[in-house]
Amino acid sequence: MAILVTGGAGFIGSHLVERFLAESSEKIVCLDNYNDYYDPAIKRKNVTAFENNPQVTMVEETFCNQDAMHRLFEEQEIDEVFHFGAYAGVRPSIERPHLYEKANIEGTLCLLEAARAHPVERFVLASSSTVYGGGAEAPFREDASIGVPLSPYGASKRAAELMGLTYHALHEVPVVCLRPFSIYGPRLRPDLAMTIFTKAILDGKPLPLFGDGSIRRDFTFITDFCDGVLATRNCPEAIGQCINLGHNHPVEIRRLIEILEEALGVKAKIDYLDAVPGEMPVTHADLSKAERLLGYSPQFPLTEGVAEFVAWYRENC
Ligand SMILES: NC(=O)c1ccc[n+]([C@@H]2O[C@H](COP(=O)([O-])OP(=O)(O)OC[C@H]3O[C@@H](n4cnc5c(N)ncnc54)[C@H](O)[C@@H]3O)[C@@H](O)[C@H]2O)c1
């Protein structure tokens, strides 16, 4: 029996593999195709801590290959799936929607089909806070009516959720849809604002700020997020549900810049740019469902999490 982590070389996936290694003696299969959405060398570096661990089987393959997924589930005896592989950027999805449709919808379907043919105990699917879309009332509750996603990325995540929920209803695949809210921490993706701002501040260059910095994000530290993900393993009530995993403390982007300045000890120069379409004005997780079902209770204030991120960045980038 084995736990499959898709996107295991990515930011969140590599943290999950490490958490499973720390907390379980089960075999782990780390699947990733090391695509070039961002520099694959970063992904190769993300896996160095565990790629030679005998408990881990590294598989370089796309989950869009249906035959390969059927073989993988059978040969590796997969009994839990943590599906965190995806194209994950909001803005690039506006220019390259087909990539997102292929990986996030078709790829998810291939994995669900493999799980239908080779039944599993759990199929945890990474959705996104972007599914709440324009006009959703904050804080976002899972049982409130949700708006239209503002980007092809958000639409692809909502479609993946719906496909997962359908496979649960129709084929009893034990799907749990998690909606992460701006996860950050060591190994954060290079395309995200926190990384871009940190690099610009340390290089003494102006950081690009789209809009006036008043949009708010519910930044959630990776350790808190992984706590919530792992809790799904022992929670049958989570099956067939969508659950927010956020922080419930949205912060303006201009406040994030101040926190980075304090952590780095350097004043930022700011290059104000036009606001871009596709960005939600606020993301804010209502956590009552996650608390009730998963005992989820985020512990890391943004200042503490940013300090950990900055320490990692200084050492590794
Ligand atoms: N980071 C966040 O704040 C955040 C917020 C909401 C949702 N999510 C979701 O969480 C998941 C992980 O995000 P992340 O920030 O770690 O992104 P990431 O880009 O660092 O990781 C995704 C990984 O998936 C791999 N991948 C993509 N397509 C693949 C395919 N066809 N076959 C195999 N591997 C493939 C990539 O190579 C990459 O390593 C994604 O589903 C993302 O949409 C992340």
Image: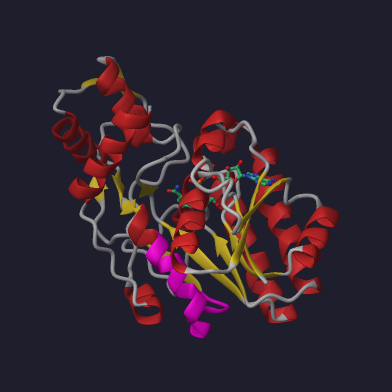
**Image quarter hosting the C terminus:** top left
Q: Where is residue 21 in the image (x, y as percent from the top left)?
A: 49, 60
Q: In this view, does 204 lie to the left or right of 62?
A: left
Colour style of the rendered protein structure: secondary structure
**Image quarter hosting the N terminus:** bottom right
Residue positioned 49% across, 65% down in the render: 178
- Tell me where the magenta segment starts and ends, as one range: 226-241
Residue found farthest to the right = 67
Q: Is residue 286 left or right of residue 121?
A: left
Residue positioned 33% across, 50% down in the render: 282
Answer whether residue 178 is magenta in the image.
no
Residue positioned 82% across, 55% down in the render: 66
Tell me: residue 15, above or below residue 123: above
In the image, 158 versus 201, the foreground residue is 201
Dominant SS of magenta comes to helix
In the image, 208 versus 280, the foreground residue is 208
Q: Is residue 209 visible?
A: no
The image shows a total of numbered marks equal to 0
In the image, 82 versus 267, the foreground residue is 82
Q: Position of residue 167 (x, y in %)?
A: 70, 73
Q: Position of residue 222 (x, y in %)?
A: 37, 53
Tell me: residue 50, above or below residue 187: below
The quarter holding residue 204 reads: top left
Answer whether residue 235 is magenta in the image.
yes
Residue positioned 52% across, 84% down in the render: 236
The quarter holding residue 141 reads: bottom left
Q: Is residue 279 visible?
A: yes
Q: Where is residue 188 in the image (x, y as percent from the top left)?
A: 41, 40
Q: Is residue 125 left or right of residue 260?
A: right
Tell me: residue 251, above or below residue 294: above
